[in-house]
Amino acid sequence: MFNNKNVLITGGTGSFGKNLANILLKKYKRIKRLVIFSRDELKQYELKKTLDINKHSCLRFFLGDVRDKQRLTRSLDGVDYVFHAAALKQVDTAEYNPFEFIKTNIIGSQNLIEACLDSSVKKVLALSTDKASSPINLYGATKLCADKLFISANNIVGKKNIKFSVLRYGNVMFSRGSILPLLVERYKQKKSFRITDTRMTRFNIELDSAIKLSISCLQKMKGGELFVPKLKSYNVLDLAKAIDNKNKLEIIGIRPGEKLHEEMISRIDSLNTYELGKIFAIIDPLNAKLIKNYKKFKKMKPHYSYNSFDNKEYLSKEELKRIVSKYI
């Protein structure tokens, strides 16, 4: 799909963006142009060395911010596909700096939509988070708003051949801000584990799986879907015990804006949710053509909720140990 095509990744120097770039370069040898769009010049410098820009002539590094619509428009010249990974994501930071998150996650998303509509882009896949479902924190609220913007953008494309969809998934293991790197750091420092609440559960997805899922969704998207993968859950206490079940625990309490359990499909969303094997698709109720395409799939029952606590699939102790062994 990506051979002889131009691809742009916003947030291209983040943990997701740089690993997606690496996989695209390895899997699609004839990719025409791969644009890394990010605002951090140091991370771009470091990524250039990692990816070996001399070996991959298709690589382009574009310094810019999604808050700057003019810069986005310039970067999208000739681009076919966009992976939108740029975002501010620290939950507690968002509570104290709300408008900064609004400017990047909401206004930045609208800037990208308008820039794509003014270019030759064919598909845009925006990455979202489980915190966007029934949000209780500012970060989740900004991502929910961004999700709505991308889905609604399909209603204003006119005669242009462009599609917008969203992929929502849980915390990526060992990503910036997730619990695993914090636990591993304290383990290596021989300090007690700090747990906010022993009842807390989260959805699990590893980075490679998230990237493969993103590529798959961009390939299959028709425009207007919000994709949700079926993931296993884990209890944060079990995760800590998988690292060292004899280490002492400190219960520090839930942080501002934090949920006890995460959710990816709310009871309201279930009214427009279809099951597609290993993935769900929440369909825009205003998109009659898209609804017709998905009628052949199983529709979820009203009041269905997909959350990390009621999830039928949990990581076993052995699976948790296998995961943490990669990082300790």
Image: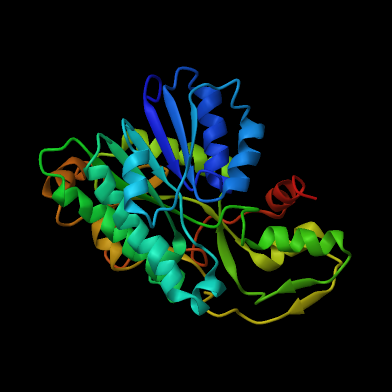
Image location of residue 104, percent across then percent down: 41, 61
Image location of residue 302, percent across then percent down: 26, 65
Please tell me which residue lies in front, 44 or 135: 44
Quarter of the image with the N terminus in it: top left
Q: Is residue 166 above or below residue 61?
A: below
Residue at 21% across / 55% down in the picture? 152
Q: Quadrant of residue 273?
A: bottom left
Drawn side of residue 212 relative to residue 242, left or right? left
Residue at 79% across / 75% down in the picture? 249
Q: Is residue 49 visible?
A: yes
Residue at 56% across / 45% down in the picture? 13
Drawn side of residue 288 relative to residue 167, left or right? left
Q: Quadrant of residue 19?
A: top right
Q: How is the image coloured?
A: rainbow
Q: Is residue 219 above or below residue 246?
A: above
Drawn side of residue 314 relative to residue 2, left or right? right
Please tell me which residue lies in front, 133 or 49: 49
